[in-house]
Image (cartoon, rainbow, N blue to C red):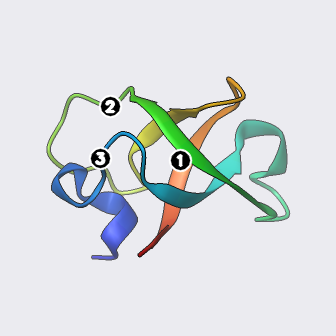
Amino acid sequence: MNEGQQRANIQTGADVEIVLKKDQRTGKRTKGTVKEILTNAPTHPHGIKVKLMDDQVGRVKKVNA
């Protein structure tokens, strides 16, 4: 299980890489800062869904320390 699949690894204000819905086929990643965590479950197989500061929504693939 990667870090983006566990809600405990993601906090608001964290720098992350997400895949937007429109980019799911290509897997293109978008970098940003977490504004809000949208997934309530502790884990999700495709990544925790978050909203970035610029209001883009996607699933976390990587958490940048």
Label 2 Cα crowd, 10 Å radius (few <14 / some 14-19 / many 20+): some
**Dot 2: what SS?**
loop
Say which residue label 2 marks.
39
| Contact (Cβ within 8 Å) of mark 2 with mark 1 | no
Report whether 8 appears left or right of 2: left
First in sequence, mark 2 or 1: give its number.
2
**Dot 3: what SS?**
loop
Q: What residue type is labelled 3?
A: Gln
Q: Which amino acid does label 1 sit on?
A: Arg
First in sequence, mark 2 or 3: give its number.
3
First in sequence, mark 3 or 1: give its number.
3
Q: Where is residue 57 in the image (x, y as percent from the top left)?
A: 63, 31
Q: Distance between the residues labelled 2 and 1?
A: 9 Å
**Dot 1: what SS?**
strand
Nearer-the-camera pick, 15 or 30: 15
Of circles 3 and 1, the one toward us is: 3
> Can you say whether 48 is above or below 38 in the image?
below
Q: Distance between the residues labelled 3 and 1?
A: 14 Å
At horizontal 35% and vertical 57% (from top left) the residue drawn is 45
Report whether 7 appears left or right of 36: left
Q: Which mark is residue 59?
A: 1
Q: Residue 11 carries which label?
A: 3
Locate the N terminus and report the quarter of the image it occupies. Answer: bottom left
> Can you say whether 36 is above or below 31 in the image?
above
